[in-house]
Image (cartoon, grey):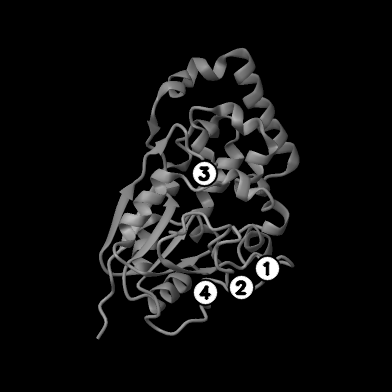
């Protein structure tokens, strides 16, 4: 597996784009509650692709795995140090953890099936995956202004049935509404606050923007800015400014405990 100088193991180099993640990608409480519920009564939890520590429950014994040095450095000081490893090669014995979780991460993995098999191997109980449905990514209004970005995003996220198949067993899929005040700044978090995406830091915290060339990105930002200045965005999407939540592409997959025996 090829890794960058930062240690990033997927298709995005977080040594280049990850500096502001701790500021822009904060844990959204409604998502955190959904994850905590899905983890059940697990006491020991593995967090794979842990990043800066978003969504790690503070009332459980969490072991974090994160290949990017930049992301590990952004973890709160009270959190345990994340282990430098990848999903595809977890340094743990079989059935080590009560449960496992991964959030906004599986689309970064080099080998999804191997990674999820490893997570299953080391986990006795449920496996919880927060991700986006690629079939719905381009339904978001941003595709009108940044089509290359959203097409890239859709290509990167693995299909939900592929994730479920790799997890095996019974897998429950739940769509997660996005609140208007969402503090986890993935692109749909700004469904009713489009001006936020004029902030370069906000765009940088969405890795899909790093896959388009600078000219395409500049055209997209200019198109959005013009639409906001002329009122065209509000003519088309203004109702979103007062919509309390948005049913977008965000989903939570929960794989039931595997049978051991």
Mark 1 residue element: loop
Q: Determine the CA span between mark 1 and mark 3.
A: 24 Å
In primary-sequence order, the first of circles 4 and 1 is 1
Quadrant including the C terminus: bottom left
Residue 13 seen by the camera: no
Q: Which residue is mark 3?
A: 184
User: Closest to the observer: 216 or 57?
Assistant: 57
Closer to us: 186 or 44 = 44
Q: How many marks?
A: 4
Rendered location of residue 235, percent (x, y): 50, 15
Instruction: Give the x, y percent position of residue 118.
Output: 44, 76
Residue pointed to by mark 4: 88
| Distance from Cα at disc 2 to Cα at disc 4 | 12 Å
The residue that mark 1 highlights is 7
* Mark closest to the chain's N terminus, 2 or 3: 2
Crowd around label 3: few <14 · some 14–19 · many ≥20 (10 Å): many
> Measuring 67% from the left and 31% from the top, which residue is drawn there?
221
**For mark 2, what is the residue?**
84
Q: Secondary structure at mark 4?
A: loop
């Amino acid at each position: 597996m090829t890794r960058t100088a930062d240690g990033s193991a997927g298709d995005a180099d977080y040594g280049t784009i990850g500096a502001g993640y701790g500021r822009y990608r904060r844990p959204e409480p409604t998502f955190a509650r959904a994850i905590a519920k899905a983890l059940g009564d697990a006491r020991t939890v593995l967090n794979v692709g842990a990043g800066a520590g978003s969504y790690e429950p503070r009332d459980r014994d969490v072991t974090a795995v994160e290949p990017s040095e930049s992301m590990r450095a952004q973890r709160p000081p009270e959190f345990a140090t994340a282990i430098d490893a990848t999903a595809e090669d977890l340094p743990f014995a079989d059935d080590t953890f009560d449960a496992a979780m991964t959030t906004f991460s599986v689309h970064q993995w080099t080998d999804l099936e191997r990674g999820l098999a490893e997570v299953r191997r080391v986990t006795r109980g449920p496996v919880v995956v927060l991700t986006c449905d690629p079939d719905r990514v381009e339904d978001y209004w941003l595709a009108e202004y940044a089509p290359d970005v959203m097409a890239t995003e859709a290509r990167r996220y693995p299909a939900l049935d592929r994730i479920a198949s790799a997890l095996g067993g019974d897998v429950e899929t739940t769509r997660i509404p996005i609140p208007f005040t969402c503090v986890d700044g993935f692109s749909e978090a700004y469904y009713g606050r489009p001006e936020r995406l004029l902030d370069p830091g906000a765009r940088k915290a969405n890795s899909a923007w790093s896959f388009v060339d600078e000219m395409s990105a500049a055209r997209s930002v200019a198109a959005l800015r013009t639409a906001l200045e002329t009122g065209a965005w509000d003519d088309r999407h203004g109702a979103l400014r007062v919509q309390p939540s948005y049913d977008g592409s965000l989903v939570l997959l929960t794989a039931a405990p595997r049978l051991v025996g």
